[in-house]
Image (tube, rainbow, N blue to C red):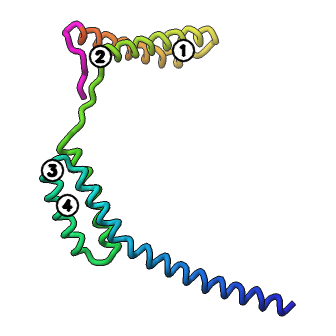
Amino acid sequence: MELVKLFWASLVVCVGFAVTIFLGLVNDEVSAWLPVLARRIIQRAAAKLKEREDVDRYLEEWLAHLQECPGRLGQLFHALGVWQGAARMSKARHPQTLRIDVKRMLVATSIILAATIMELFSIKYDGVPWPILILYAVQIAGALVAIICAAKMLMKGRKYIEL
């Protein structure tokens, strides 16, 4: 019995040493790849910018600052900050507008209105309390307002809503 305990104890110690050596190797490998990863993140971040001269200028500036950052984790955090900043810069310089086709909006709102009215009539006969029916009335009123506004826009010749 004592021999079995000694065997398991020595096995645990050997496995512990093997795991420690393996994790040390993994740590060395990961830390060796961190600067490469940081450079690639910065290159991708610079590519997000639209103008070619901005891409070259910011890439050079960000890579130079990367070399000044102490430690491999510091470089990675700098690269992630650059990635986030490039995304904000790109959105600020090139805002996207949302275009809504008024005819499609009119058709979709009409379908929603018809479905809501049919649902209202179907639940009215099931004995649903009046306060719940009022919620349907509010939804119907909103759909009617949207339909009237879309119809007026079409009569004025506006085909799109830009947001």
Q: Disc number at residue 130? A: 1
C-beta proximity under 8 Å, tags 1 and 2: no
Q: Is disc 2 placed on a helix, strand or loop?
A: helix
Q: Amino acid at mark 3?
A: Arg
Residue 52 pos. (x, y %): 15, 50
What kind of residue is marked 2? Val
Q: Around disc 3, counting alpha carbons within 10 Å, would you say few (fewer than 14), some (14 to 19), or many (20 or more)?
A: few
Q: Quadrant of the N terminus?
A: bottom right
Indicate whether 48 appears above or below 103: below
Between tags 4 and 1, which lies in front?
A: 4
For mark 2, what is the residue?
102
Task: Point out the tag, 4 or 3, that comes first from the N-terminus.
Answer: 3
Residue 150 in the image: state x and y as whole percent. Answer: 29, 13
What element does badge 3 sit on?
helix
Q: Is residue 67 magenta?
A: no
- Of callouts 4 and 1, which one flags the residue occurring earlier in the amino acid sequence? 4
Mark in front: 2 vs 3: 3
Which numbered disc flags the more N-terminal residue, 4 or 2?
Answer: 4
The Cα atoms of the two marked residues, 2 and 3, are separated by 37 Å
Upstream in sequence: badge 1 or badge 2: 2
Residue name at image x 21 percent, y 50 percent: 49
Residue placed under numbered mark 3 in the picture: 52
Q: Label 2: how many residues lie within 10 Å, few (<14), some (14-19) or many (20+)?
A: some
Q: Residue at x 31, y 77 (%)?
A: 71
Segment tinted magenta in the rendering: 155-163
Residue that badge 4 annotates: 59
Q: Residues within 10 Å of mark 4 (few under 14, many from 20)?
A: many
- Give the CA separation, mark 4 to mark 1: 64 Å
Q: Are marks 4 and 1 in contact (CB under 8 Å)?
A: no
Q: Is residue 78 above or below residue 84?
A: below
> Which of the two labelled residues, at mark 2 and mark 3, occupies the earlier sequence position?
3
Spatial CA distance of label 4 from label 3 is 11 Å
